[in-house]
Image (cartoon, coloured by chain):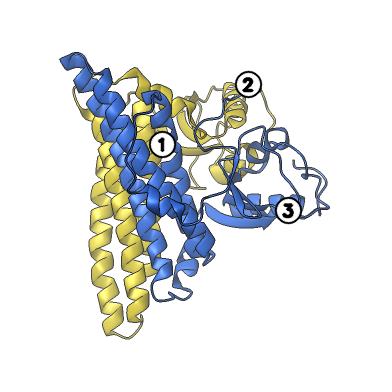
């Protein structure tokens, strides 16, 4: 499998600064040269991840996941600002401007999606909503599930790329929680460890297999 | 006629809005106006669903079938779906404009963690003549088919009763290693799902 270079915040263990992201919202943004392509790719990835995380937060009634959503929302703001700056610097002709306007429109849409995710997690913090949300979300075709990795599972200390979780079960691991830290969009070289909490997305059937494997009740995924 | 429940409608809005996002990104990746136009059509469907939901939710409150807080939650969740649908439409709008797409758009979508792929089902493929329910492509390969073309006829968000025929073109979303598996299956190179 080809080695993928790590982009932005994905595939690495990171500790979300507690409450610090709130200040970040107001700090002056400095010009950092990153390519428009890398910025847009990260924005697209966040826009997909953040919606799943937001629904997970309400589904599992979990404030910690909601905090991550808020962090990603702030990061998305910054990326959107950066991409505008980069696009302007890259514009030389009318044709450039026309084409780059399309890129900025997609970036703006990604940002709208992340703001919506922020709205979804607000459902959690207001009056405790009761079981109606989980009841609705549990009927979706593709659902979100949480799995804790047992120390007896063969998955421990294995790379997700080698386990081929997604192509074997159709379950996509969207994030891993390890103690206080998070890994978003685990990449093929991300290692699974005992006691990791995985947030996954997929079908009921896929979940049954995958949870057996991660709970150590099944030796191999197939 | 059986009336859809409030829960059913809000779920339909959620599922459709996510389908729209996938379709919108695919339309850019394959420079495909038909898919982009479908995003527009789905946006209209969601608008109607949302209006029906608002009315029905209020009726349920009046009939004391739904508590006020639950009704608010349902409406806010649906509102989120509606906003996501709008964002998808914005993305599809880029495809429908009379401007050549910037190559970066395709590259970014191609390089992201979730890939989109397009495959044609060859006559010798194991997929031909089977339904999605029989194949369980999603849980077996990780690839979820979001749209398919059957001759001139399109089908969006196929369900378990949808049948795949030879010559159909599938648009699917999934991981990189699932993509190769799906290509091998549809070309007939591999018979093992």
* Chain letter for the yellow colouring in the rendering: B
Question: At 59% from the left edge and 48% from the top edge, which residue is drawn?
Answer: A182
**Mark 3 highlights which residue?**
A149
Name the image quarter holding residue A187: top right
Relative vertical location of residue B175 with respect to residue A73 in this rendering, above or below: above
Chain A: its colour in the image is blue
In the drawing, does residue B99 fall left or right of residue B138? Answer: left
Q: CA distance from mark 2 to mark 3?
A: 27 Å
Chain of the residue where label 3 is placed in the rendered structure: A
Write down the chain letter for disc 2: A
For this orientation, the residue located farthest to the bottom is B64
- Please state the total of marks drawn on the protein image: 3
Q: Which residue is mark 2?
A: A2
Sequence-first disc among 2 and 3: 2
User: Along the horizontal axis of the image, is B158 left or right of A94?
Assistant: right
Residue B121: percent from left, percent from top: 52, 25
The residue depicted at 83 percent of the width and 46 percent of the height is: A219
Disc 1: which chain?
A
Both marks 2 and 3 on one chain: yes
Q: Give the mark, 1 or 3, whose residue is nearer the N terminus.
A: 1
Residue sitting nearer the eye, B77 or A12? A12
The quarter of the rendered structure image containing the C terminus of chain A is top right
Most distant residue in the left direction: A94
Name the residue tied to disc 1: A44
Q: Nearer the viewer, residue A136 or A31?
A: A31
The residue depicted at 28 percent of the width and 21 percent of the height is B101
**Image quarter for residue B60?**
bottom left
Q: Percent position (x, y) of residue B9?
A: 35, 62
> Relative to A161, does residue A76 appear above or below in the rendering?
below
Q: Quadrant of residue A35?
A: top left
The local secondary structure at tag 1 comes to helix
């Amino acid at each position: 499998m080809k080695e993928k270079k790590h982009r932005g915040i994905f595939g690495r263990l990171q500790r979300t600064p507690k409450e610090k992201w709130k200040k970040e919202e107001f700090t002056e943004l400095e010009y950092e040269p990153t390519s428009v392509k890398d910025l847009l790719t990260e924005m697209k990835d966040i826009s997909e991840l953040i919606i799943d995380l937001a629904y997970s937060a309400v589904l599992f009634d979990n404030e910690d996941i909601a905090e991550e959503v808020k962090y990603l929302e702030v990061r998305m703001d910054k990326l959107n600002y950066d991409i505008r700056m980069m696009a302007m610097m890259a514009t030389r002709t009318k044709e450039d401007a026309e084409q780059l306007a399309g890129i900025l429109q997609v970036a703006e849409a990604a940002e709208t999606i992340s703001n919506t995710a922020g709205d979804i997690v607000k459902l959690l913090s207001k009056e405790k909503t009761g079981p109606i949300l989980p009841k609705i979300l549990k009927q979706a075709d593709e659902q979100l599930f949480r799995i804790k990795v047992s120390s007896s599972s063969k998955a421990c200390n294995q790379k997700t790329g080698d386990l081929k979780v997604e192509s074997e079960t159709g379950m996509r691991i969207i994030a891993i929680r390890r103690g206080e830290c998070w890994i978003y969009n685990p990449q093929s070289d991300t290692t699974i460890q005992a006691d990791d909490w995985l947030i996954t997305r997929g079908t009921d059937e896929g979940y049954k297999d995958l949870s057996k494997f991660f709970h150590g009740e099944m030796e191999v995924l197939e | 006629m059986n009336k859809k429940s409030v829960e059913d409608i809000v779920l339909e809005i959620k599922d459709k809005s996510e389908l729209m996002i996938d379709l919108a990104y695919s339309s850019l990746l394959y420079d495909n106006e038909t898919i982009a136009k479908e995003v527009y059509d789905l946006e209209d469907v969601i608008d109607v669903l949302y209006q029906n939901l608002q009315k029905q939710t209020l009726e349920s409150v009046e009939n004391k079938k739904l508590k006020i807080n639950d009704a608010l939650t349902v409406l806010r969740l649906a509102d989120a779906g509606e906003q996501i649908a709008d964002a998808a439409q914005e993305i599809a709008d880029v495809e429908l404009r009379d401007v050549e797409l910037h190559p970066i758009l395709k590259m970014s979508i191609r390089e992201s963690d979730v890939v989109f792929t397009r495959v044609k089902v060859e006559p010798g493929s194991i997929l031909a003549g089977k339904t999605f329910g029989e194949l369980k492509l999603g849980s077996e390969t990780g690839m979820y088919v979001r749209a398919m073309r059957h001759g001139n006829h399109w089908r969006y968000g196929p369900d378990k009763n949808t049948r795949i025929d030879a010559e159909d073109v599938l648009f699917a979303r999934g991981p990189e290693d699932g993509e190769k598996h799906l290509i091998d299956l549809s070309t007939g190179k591999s018979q093992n799902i």
